[in-house]
């Protein structure tokens, strides 16, 4: 009976990895039937929470983004390997990364990491983003405008950066933020559609389109936090943080990390202080 309770379609659920605002994540075994034998493969399984399984706008965008993300093949991007529905519960299957996310790693090291590790994270995540931003998705759903280029992450933060036991750095959850942005359920909750301290200023203005620069902004915030132990725009609450981001006056990383080499400081600060926005006044 216990085994049946832990079955979900072709999956055997092993243990819960976490619960977010949109999905519950499990370590699971994907079950394959080969002749008379049952073969298993360890995977990461995201089950969409019940309230989103009834949100048609969310589900439409979720499946569209899953079709795009499943095409991404890069060593620094968590691979989406399947998605679908089992008895009304929608899911996404991803490669299982045995390790820890950057959020937990920072907490375990007092909020800062050695410069050499930060440099490696920067190189690996930037490589994955460059690939995704230049990827041209194959039209699998008939809804994509011809010539549309690039997949934007929109939610880069420490919890979406995974570091494996083998030393690999991978970016997870492409497209999830875009699906949530289309969700009436998420909007009704009035929760920020993204993690405010890491969000680029154009994310707070519907008149400005989001492109790859927003991801670079977020990556710059993450790197600043990794070396400095704080984020450059943080206020006392979300409202103050948003105001600081829109005003565009970040703290200097050299102030928090005396002696940091100029090249690394420039790499971290350039994306978080860009001014391409020209925010509309009305």
Image (tube, rainbow, N blue to C red):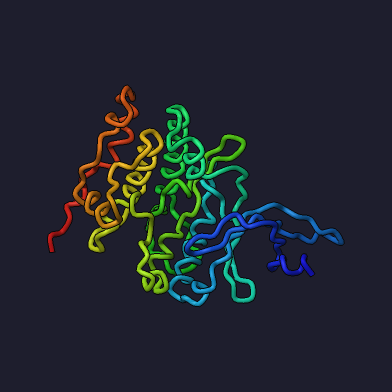
Q: Position of residue 162 (x, y in %)?
A: 53, 44
Q: Is residue 121 left or right of residue 220?
A: right
Q: How many marks?
A: 0
Q: Nearer the viewer, residue 17 or 174?
A: 17
Please identify the residue farthest to the left as the structure is shown.
281
Tell me: residue 268, above or below residue 93: above
Indicate the quadrant where residue 83 lies.
Answer: bottom right
Tell me: residue 42, above or below residue 62: above
Q: Quadrant of the C terminus?
A: bottom left
Residue beneath the point at 38% across and 54% down: 195
Q: Position of residue 272 (x, y in %)?
A: 28, 42
Q: Position of residue 185 (x, y in %)?
A: 42, 73
Q: Would residue 209 be seen by someone viewing this image from the given angle?
A: no
Q: Nearer the viewer, residue 139 or 83?
A: 83
Residue beneath the point at 79% across and 55% down: 39
Q: Is residue 62 left or right of residue 98?
A: left
Residue beneath the point at 45% across and 32% down: 113
Indicate the quadrant where residue 13 lies.
Answer: bottom right
Residue beneath the point at 58% across and 58% down: 25
Q: Quadrant of the N terminus?
A: bottom right
Q: Position of residue 109 (x, y in %)?
A: 49, 35
Q: Would residue 25 be seen by someone viewing this image from the given angle?
A: yes
Tell me: residue 137, above or below residue 59: above
């Amino acid at each position: 009976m216990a085994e049946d309770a832990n079955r979900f379609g072709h999956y055997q659920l092993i243990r819960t990895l976490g619960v977010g605002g949109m999905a519950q994540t499990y370590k699971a075994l994907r079950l394959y039937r080969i002749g008379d034998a049952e073969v298993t493969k360890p995977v990461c399984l995201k089950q969409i929470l019940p309230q989103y399984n009834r949100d048609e706008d969310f589900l439409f965008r979720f499946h569209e983004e899953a079709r795009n993300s499943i095409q991404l093949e890069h060593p620094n991007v968590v691979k989406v390997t399947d998605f679908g529905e089992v008895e009304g519960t929608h899911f996404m299957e991803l490669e299982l990364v045995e390790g820890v996310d950057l959020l937990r790693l920072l907490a375990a090291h007092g909020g800062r990491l050695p410069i050499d590790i930060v440099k490696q994270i920067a190189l690996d995540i930037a490589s994955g983003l460059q690939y995704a931003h230049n990827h041209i998705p194959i039209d699998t759903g008939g809804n994509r405008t011809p010539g549309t280029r690039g997949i934007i992450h929109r939610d880069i933060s420490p919890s979406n950066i995974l570091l494996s036991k083998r030393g690999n750095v991978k970016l997870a959850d492409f497209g999830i933020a875009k699906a949530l942005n289309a969700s009436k359920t998420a909007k009704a909750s009035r929760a920020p559609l993204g993690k405010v301290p890491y969000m680029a200023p154009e994310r707070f203005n519907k008149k400005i389109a989001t492109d790859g620069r927003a991801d670079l902004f977020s990556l710059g915030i993450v790197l600043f936090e990794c070396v400095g132990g704080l984020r450059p725009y943080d206020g006392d609450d979300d409202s103050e943080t948003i105001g600081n981001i829109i005003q565009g006056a970040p703290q200097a990383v050299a102030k928090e990390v005396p002696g940091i080499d100029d090249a690394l400081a420039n790499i971290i600060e350039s994306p978080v202080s860009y001014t391409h926005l020209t925010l509309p006044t009305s």
